[in-house]
Image: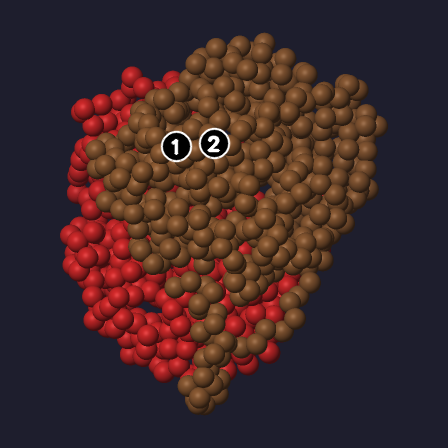
Amino acid sequence: MKATRLAALLLFAPALLAAQQAPDRSRPPALGPPPKLTLPAIEKHELKNGLDVWLIERHEVPLVQINLLVHAGSGDDPAGAFGLASLTAAMLDEGAGSLSALEIADEVEFLGADLGATSSFDASAVRLNVPVRALDRALPIMADVALKPTFPAEELERLREERITALLQARDDPAAVAAAAFPRALFGGTHRYGTSAVGTTATLAAFTREQLAAFHAERYRPANSTLIVVGDVTAATVLPLLEGAFGGWSGDRSVQRTAVPAAPRPRERQVTIVDVPGAAQSAIRVGTVGVARSTPDYFPLQVLNTVLGGSFTSRLNQNLREEHGYAYGANSRFDMRLSPGTFVAAANVQTDKTAESVREMFNELDAIGKPIGADELAKTKNYLALGFPSAFETIEDLAARIEELSIYGLPEQFYAEYTTKIGAVTAAAAQRAAAPIIEPDALAVVVVGDRATIEPGIRELNLGPVRVVGVEEVVP
Amino acid sequence: MRSPFALSFALVALHVAPCASAQPPAPLEVPFKQFTLDNGLNVVLHRDTSVPIVAVNVWYHVGSANEKPGRTGFAHLFEHLMFEGSKNVPEGAFDTLLEAAGATNNGSTSNDRTNYIIDVPTNALELALFLESDRMGYLLATMTPSVVDGQRDVVKNERRQSYENRPYGMAEIALDELLWPEGHPYHWPTIGYMEDLTAASHDDVVAFFKTYYAPNNASLVLAGDIDLDKAQALVEKWFGAIPRGADVLPVAPPSAMLSGVTRKTLQDRVSLPRLYLAWLTPRHFAPGDASLDLVSAVLTGGKNSRLYKRLVYDMQIAQDVSAFQASAALGSAFQIVATARPGHTAAELNAVIDEELARLQKEPPTAREVQRALNQIEASFYRGMESVGGFGGKADQLNAYYASGGGPDYFAEDLARYMALTPADVQAAASQWLPLARRVEVTVEPEESR
């Protein structure tokens, strides 16, 4: 049942139906005015070496989250060295200062702390979550990991083999294959976004410790970084500790980043089948190149995507799951990065309903051009705006939100204004924003499944040229 | 689980008094008010005003352990039906009304219980109580065979996505079949067998609802920004008139024990062999249960843990190794799972694992190994205090403690049962519960065509 029809049904439910004793179940209880979320202010400080410190006090639990965010990520991987930023980050806690990999792990765990280093396409980060009483002991280890990694050769060999093996395992998993195959179909093998952050078997095999050390030396610099602190501390208690741990970090030069080039959108429909003989389901991905995080249409696209596939009652999920039962769920999302990432509608469907499912997904993508009902729009905007505080649940979540402000250069009032800006989105604005992106005649379709069963039905849909590839080709 | 949408919604829990830095952590205190309605519904209220959110959490004391052979997977299928409308809530309205209020909801089914979560902004508390009470009291009014058919298809696809089409997905099902004897309710998978999902009927739904979905077989927790008296009045208003059902008899499982080593080899669409070792162990909260959590930490918690260090770090013959005590009400299972690197075999991994088990059974772990694990566990309890809603948030945990018989204020006692453990306890648990000669060994090998 479509949400629009449903809302009308509710509105006109005859009051007589509910001549029961208290409570009155004839209609849903009225909602009072929604509560306001008061977002905590960010205190901005600077260490003597110029490193920015953004602090939010949270005293609910005796824990603190400290993230060193570095403005360098997989988007900065040189051609032919895809996976460099990711492996560099992964190697940080494999030896640092005078500590070995095992010593770092032992000490961090003994303190009840959690320390990790990872990178995404847009940034890298070393993140520490620690009981406040152990902060003074954990912080120097974190600083060594972030600033003085030693990149031991034997640890590099171990991680290299681990990652190459993980790629081998990814080929076994239709969900992982789809996650790799869809961006590859859109961006190709040479554009950075066409290969996962970890790189390929070939690039992993070739990395040297000198490459990693050079990437770290060039990119991990105070002028390039922000220290984000959230938790049960105050500026007076934490700043001296931070100065002691990070104040000696030198390097005044900031690094120019080269933007990942925006990839062109497909001009016609193209279908890629990735053959997984015997698969019980087909992983379907339909979409195109989306938008960068800096898009002026951020709010309209949030609303549009939520209508299409961003919540349980979204059109894709209602259609594929509730109406047809083809899938456990269906959804869509924009992956907004520094440069345009993917827009993708996704569902894992039973093999014998693959073509039917692709058709229904296109039906919903086509329908995006038709008017969005007032009830549907209101529901969607409320869901986004009133549910928004969930993104601020834990100190870890809150620190992650602050990272986003830094990575994408968002205004500090971004979160404070979120609810209002969602509220201001009109149906027309949402559709206007989507129109140049979601063109149903020019989308990439990737289906990971049992070719022998699904290919004839997919071809009968006459979507466009069909290409069949093996998993090795999309997860090289 | 009912919804694949990862939109967990819950806000910061403010439960401890603000404490100065560099002090020992404040005690784990979650103050609550508990009462029982005349119809037998247990209610727990916990006030946490840090954010304007209320977590509405219901546990029904029914899970796959209550199913009959031939109808496996039914408790979980039923969980799906609970979202499809009730007497005063048209099909689809449950989700639409909640989303329009900025709320999220979900449900999940285990062997022992079925839980439902609705996390709402404070102004929508009464809406959540209306919806939750309507399906508790009046679900069958709108239930039809076609509604059952619709969710049957969805659940079959959930099974395909999570088991058939996931690498190694069938191993856990095989493991339980070998670990628990025929007729024991943990013998079959919570997701159910396909033919049983096909067989489930509308009549089954009616009978199941009448037997298990009565208020006297449920527990409701509200946690968040509530006034305790007002919340109690609202609970009485919306749930008070729901009729009590017949008492639910506890599950009486046949005894389960292993008398030797049971081995099975499966083939799957995978590149690397994987080994599963499993033992029957003490039920949740019974003596030995917490010790086995420490055994798992000593074996596979972190780079310095014994199995990780040998298999993954030093020898590099495994891609991963994990161990865990899967605690449950009628009995637990301890598992060790390891995946071989290319060119290595499950048998090689098995040999090293057995060496390390024998060593832990012969001599206690070092004080530092145990303290390292305890410090991690203590910190994890505090991390668990940050959310009121969602799966595993405070509301859910209050119900979990109540269901286990420990009382909803069990947080501190639960932590205390770990903090009291010594290296000798860890050694004793490994000796008593993880015998090399009495266990299940499942190996997943790459299909021969690969």
Instruction: Sort mark 1 into few (<14), some (14-19) or many (20+) by Cα contacts within 10 Å.
Output: many
Applied colour scheme? by chain
Q: Which chain is brown?
A: A
| On screen, residue A310 above or below A123 | below
As helix, strand or loop, the secondary structure at mark 2 comes to: loop
Residue B136 position in % (x across, y down): 38, 74
Q: Colour of chain B?
A: red
Relative to A1, B71 lies left or right: left
Relative to B420, B74 lies left or right: left
Q: Are marks 1 and 2 in contact (CB under 8 Å)?
A: yes
Residue B360 position in % (x across, y down): 37, 32
Q: Residue at x 60, y 25 (%)?
A: A260
Chain letter of the residue beneath label 2 in the structure image: A
Any part of residue B200 in sight? yes
Instruction: Give the residue type at disc 2.
Output: Pro
Q: Residue at x 77, y 29 (%)?
A: A51
Residue B402 position in % (x across, y down): 44, 65
Which quarter of the figure has residue B359? top left
Any part of residue B19 in sight? no
Camera-side residue of B193 and A457? A457
Q: Which mark is residue A270?
A: 1
Q: Residue at x 64, y 25 (%)?
A: A259
Camera-side residue of B374 and B278? B278
Instruction: Sort mark 2 into few (<14), some (14-19) or many (20+) by Cα contacts within 10 Å.
Output: some
| On screen, residue A276 above or below A101 | below
Q: Quadrant of the C terminus of chain A?
A: top left
Which residue is identified by label 2?
A266
